[in-house]
Image (cartoon, rainbow, N blue to C red):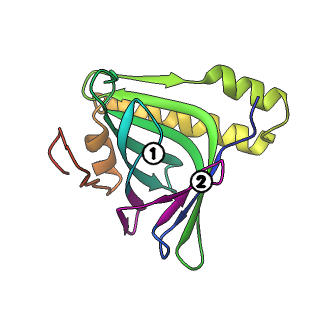
Amino acid sequence: MHPPKIQTFDVPASVNIDNKGFRRQVAEYRETPFGLYMSRAIVGRESAHWIESWLLPELGICVSDWSWNPGHHRDQDFYLDIALIEPEPGGVWRMTDLYLDIVVGAGEWSRVLDVDEFVQAVGAGLIDAAAAEYAMHRTHDTVAALAAHGHDLDAWLATEGITLTWNGPGRVRPAG
């Protein structure tokens, strides 16, 4: 069982430091009142070549959209990490992944993933009771909100005053 994955989003340096300490050059960062957008190439992964993510601290989620390589397409429109997201002074954001994830098939379904990892992490003491409770509430609230809006991420987020825009290469869906 691995400890929680922690990523750093260093806006002034235009880098994303992953949980293994690899520094990845970011093509675009955009800060808004509700979160942080990141767009960057994926290095060393056979299945995908680009990732765009929105860190939404008030909702406790990171919404990602992957650009898949031919032959590796996944049946999902968005991937949501349940996370503690902390903007820090100086334009640096820190995200602690709390193991639970949600995949969304726009307008059709939402599924919770990695419950087994979450249970193991809690059992191993890798996240404390407060973080585990936070993760459970965020997961349930997010799935309920998605279901109430027909599994339409944009429709739900609009009720929260959030409009996500995507600028990465090879966009399949229209922006906004």
- Which range of residues does the magenta coloring cover? 15-38
Amino acid type at mark 2: Phe
- 127 to the left or right of 72: right
Question: Is residue 77 or residue 112 the one in the foreground?
Answer: 77
| SS of the residue under disc 1 | loop
Circle 2 crowding by C-alpha within 10 Å: few under 14, some 14–19, many from 20: few
Q: Residue at x 45, y 38 (%)?
A: 80
Question: Is residue 38 or residue 86 the one in the foreground?
Answer: 38
Inspect the magenta stretch and tell me whether residue 71 lies in it.
Answer: no
How many discs appear? 2
User: Do the numbered discs 1 and 2 sit on residues whose CB atoms are within 8 Å?
Assistant: yes
Q: Which residue is mark 1?
A: 43
Q: Quadrant of the N terminus?
A: top right
Q: Residue 156 got which mark?
A: none
Circle 1 crowding by C-alpha within 10 Å: few under 14, some 14–19, many from 20: few
Q: Position of residue 53 (x, y in %)?
A: 40, 50
Q: Which residue is mark 2?
A: 22
Q: Position of residue 56 (x, y in %)?
A: 46, 54
Q: Position of residue 127 (x, y in %)?
A: 77, 40
Inspect the magenta stretch and tell me whether residue 23 lies in it.
Answer: yes
